[in-house]
Every structure is written in structure tokens, then in C-alpha cells.
Amino acid sequence: MMTPEQYRLLLTPEVRRTVEEQIGRDPAAIALDKRIPHAALVATQVKYLARARTKLPSYYEARCILPPLAFEQASSEACAARKSCSGERVLDLTCGLGVDALYLSKRFREVITLERDATLAAVAGENFRRLGATNIRVINSSAEAFLASTRDHFDWIYADPDRRSAEGRKLVRLEDCSPDIPKLLPELRRIAPNLCVKNSPLFDVGEALRLFPDSRVEVLSLGDECKEVVVYDDGSGPLVTATALGRGSFSAAPGETAPPPGRFDPERYGYLVIPDVSLQKARLARIHLAGKADIWSDNGYGFAVEEPEGVLGRTFAVESIEPYDPKRLKRELKGREAEVLKRDFPLAAEELMRRLGLHAGAGLRLAFTKIGNDFWVIRLK
């Protein structure tokens, strides 16, 4: 965590000017440069500003202060911009670096955001000033203390609970995170009718619907990586949505099913579909691909006779589909470069490459999967 002294130094004109002058340099070289006052602190800010150009471009442009731990735990701006709640007033229980509060301020007239660490609360307030977000008020308080004393009312409450234990262990169950949202629900209901909770990408969609039965649950992915599971407990559900940012969304009611495909016939298929990870996480792949491609598992590949349109995922032309025979494949492919993909297959991609004697590269693209009791390798064009 950033210390009060480090924060004070980052406010001084001298250190701010030095950070600006060093942008673009290797942070390791900056840290070792004895000519630079407070070189380690400057190097850290340069390092995280460089990373912010992609993850938090507004913070980069405004030259915000970026405490490392808060940066690592922050939402990306792309994910924060997706939050679909709006109204007059919102209470953010978990400010952190304030990225979600910043984007909530574009949808609400007033944002009250809580941060229990005094230095991080000061950092967030300073960053909002640099970002020109004048309708956000930062309060240095825990969620529990604020809820126990407030008589205010809000349209929405937003929370991104801390998912690290005191020992640094990752937490997944919402009851184990801080603040404990299920425990606080009576207090939350007292001051706001609607609740939005951002959860870990590991958080189970079924668990979200168990805790919040009438909610909308949205799984967000970015660049083929699942980023977060967001619950909108506003009585508009139950509904599950998979969203691949920049690509599209697909929604279905919980429990909705698609008819199972028939027998797997490798000779029929000309295209392989890799459903986006948001569909996989939301358990919507089979419903999404119904009528477009045959798929035997939400975790598996889709197979299509003709190239499908409107698919949330990637589509590849198939060269051949054959039974997985590791001895024959090794004799044929050993020493060659390949990209290896796998879904519903018991071996990791790295282990497959080792067993088949392959090297990472762009020479071949191979996909491995299991359908029923049979293992298959798909050569892609």
C-alpha cells in the first residue's frame, strides 16, 4: 500500500515533473539512476503509467497517481464503462483506485464512494480532481461504519469487494470477501432498492443466482479472457448474459436448454467454432450455437457444416478431423512448429506439445477435444 509520505512526494511539483520527464524510459533503469531524486518512487509511477495506457487510458492522459496494489485490483476502463446502472445517486462501497466510481459518475448525478484506507482515499480524490470528475465525493470510511450511521438514500449501491485475505490468499465466495455483502444485505436494502456487485471471474453464475434470485448476471470478457461476473440485483431477472467486449452479447433465461446434437460425424464439418470464454463461463455456449453449429458441451468446441454467422467467438476452416493417436502424431509432427488449442481435453496445451515433440510457432494450428468417449485432433487451415 502507498504510504502517506510517498503520496505527499507525488504531489510535489519536483516529483511530478520528474515522472513526466522519465515517461518512456525503462523503469529498472530509472530506479538505478542516482541522478534522479526519489528514483524508486518515480520508477514505479512510470511503470504503472505505461501499463495504464492500455488498461486505464484516461488515468494515463491525466497523469494520475497509481498505487501498485490498487492498480492491480482495479477494473479496466473497458469493463467499468460496461456497468449498466444509472440514476440520481449511487453509493460505491469500495472505491479503491476509483475506476468504477469514475464511470458511475457518467451515469449518475452524484457518486458517494467509500475508501477505508486514508491514503488511498486521498489518492482517489486527487485523481478525480485531475480527471475533472466533480460529482464524486470520497469518504474515508469502511462500508460497515458508513452503513451503520447513514440516513441517506440512494438509487443504487455498487460494490467490488476485496477478494484477498489478510494473508494475500484469493477469495471466491462472496461471504468471505470484504465487505461481506450477503451479511450487509438488510442494511443495503434499507438505503437503496438496487444493488450491483462486481465479482471475480472465478465466481460461479449459479451461486450468483442463488444469492440474488431475481438478478441479471453478466459475464464480461475482454481479449478472450474472462474479467468479471457482475450481478444487477434490481428485480429485472433472472437473466444471464455473456458479453465479449467489442464483439457483442448474448442472453438467456437460467435453465434454458438447446436440443442435443446427434452423432459426431467428422466427415461432415467444414468449420470449427471456439465459443468466447464469456459464453463458456455463463454456460450459454450450447444455446448460443443452436442452429448454427453442433456442440456437445458448454466447455467444448462447436462444429459447423457451413461457416456460421453472428457467432460470439472465433471460427476456423477445418482441414481434417481425425482420432487422437499420439504415437502416429509424434512420428508425423515431431520437431515442427505449431499453435495448440484445447477444449474438453485432459492434457494441457504445453503437455500436448511436449508429448508430440512440437515447438511453439505458426507452422500448424491444431485443436484437441473429447466428444463422448472419443478423443479428436482437428487440423485447422
Image (cartoon, rainbow, N blue to C red):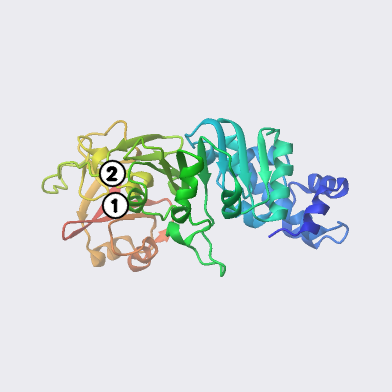
333 left or right of 170? left
Pointer 2 residue:
285
Which part of the image, by quadrant, shows the N terminus? bottom right
Position of residue 194 relative to residue 341, above or below, is above
In the rendered view of the protein, which quadrant contains the C terminus? Answer: top left
Tell me if 225 is positioned left or right of 146 in this view.
Answer: left
Report how far apart the C-alphas of labels 2 and 1 lie in the structure. Answer: 8 Å
Judge the density around disc 1: few (<14), some (14-19), many (≥20) Cα neighbours within 10 Å: many
For label 2, count other residues whose C-alpha is less than 10 Å away and answer few (under 14), some (14-19) or many (20+).
Answer: many
* Residue in the image at 49% along x and 46% along y: 188
Percent x, y for residue 23?
Answer: 75, 46
Secondary structure at badge 1 equals: loop
Q: Amino acid at mark 2?
A: Ala
| Residue 169 location (% of width, % of height) | 51, 67
Tell me, yes or no, if residue 52 can be seen here. Answer: yes
Question: Which residue is at the far bottom?
Answer: 167
Determine the secondary structure under disc 2.
helix
Q: Nearer the viewer, residue 130 or 260?
A: 130
Task: Check contact, mark 2 vs mark 1: CB within 8 A.
Answer: yes
Residue 5 lies, in percent from the top left, at: 81, 58
Question: Residue flagged by tag 1: what amino acid is it?
Answer: Asn
Left/right of residue 356 with respect to residue 199 in the rendered view: left
Q: Is residue 66 visible?
A: no
Mark number displayed over residue 299:
1
Q: Position of residue 96 (x, y in %)?
A: 62, 50
**Mark with earlier residue (2, 1):** 2
